[in-house]
Amino acid sequence: TWLPDTDPPAPSESGEASSLRPMILLGLLGLAAAFLEAPGNEWSATFIDDAFDAAPATAALGFVAFTVGMTASRLVGVSDVSADLGMNAQAVAVQVRGGSAINRLHGLWSIGTGGGGALGAAAAGAGVTLEAHLVTVGVLMAGVAWLAGAGLTDAPPPAPREADATSALRPRVLLGLLGLGAAFLEAPGNDWSATFIDDAFDASPATAALGFVAFTVGMT
């Protein structure tokens, strides 16, 4: 066959239990993802057909739209997490060399979030279209990131250490749970503050966007 031969895996010194736990965790994550994606994958076309009496070709576009939306949301999530991880890794690299950067970078992140929200509110008040706003800001930020990348500090290689798989997994699970809890706290205000102000008070887009600014300033 054209498939390459692979060597059998080396026996684990930490036992079968430690290697089983990450498999169970990955399985649970896959199950949760299936519950989130299954309704859109399986029923989007059926819903459009029943709700709007659409033609089969039109109803099938519901599945296409759901797939494109899920792909876009994943790209946005990966980009956001990559930026956050890069910021923290750079801060650690600076602090290893004797500087102080983590608190400053997180403070600048908060200032940028509030400033970006205020800029979006001003753009909405001035009648700038969403497409023009996103393209303009995207191009400007890409240029800033490219220029800033030249001054980044190389991270030192991690020191070699031996750790049991179980002991290494526990803090990661704990950090993951803490991150999940923080997401549950921040996501409603980040994602829905402007929508709530718009629905509850029939506010203009510029005024509604200030709800996000107020939330980020309060979080800071």
Image (tube, rainbow, N blue to C red):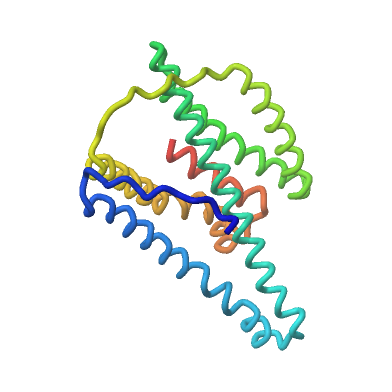
Frontmost residue, 144 versus 16: 16
For the N terminus, the quadrant is: bottom right
In the image, is 22 to the left or to the right of 7?
Answer: left
Estimate the x, y position of residue 74 in percent, counting from the top left.
Answer: 57, 53
Q: Quadrant of residue 23?
A: bottom left
Estimate the x, y position of residue 202 in percent, counting from the top left.
Answer: 62, 61
At 71% across and 77% down in the image, what residue appears? 60
In the image, is 198 to the left or to the right of 136?
Answer: left
| 68 versus 104 height, above or below | below
| 142 versus 71 height, above or below | above
Estimate the x, y position of residue 90 in percent, counting from the top left.
Answer: 48, 24
| 32 versus 164 height, above or below | below
For the C terminus, the quadrant is: top left
Q: Quadrant of residue 79?
A: top right
At 51% across and 27% down in the image, what residue appears? 108
Q: Residue furthest front?
A: 1
Frontmost residue, 36 versus 183: 36
Q: Residue furthest top?
A: 98
Report the label total.
Answer: 0
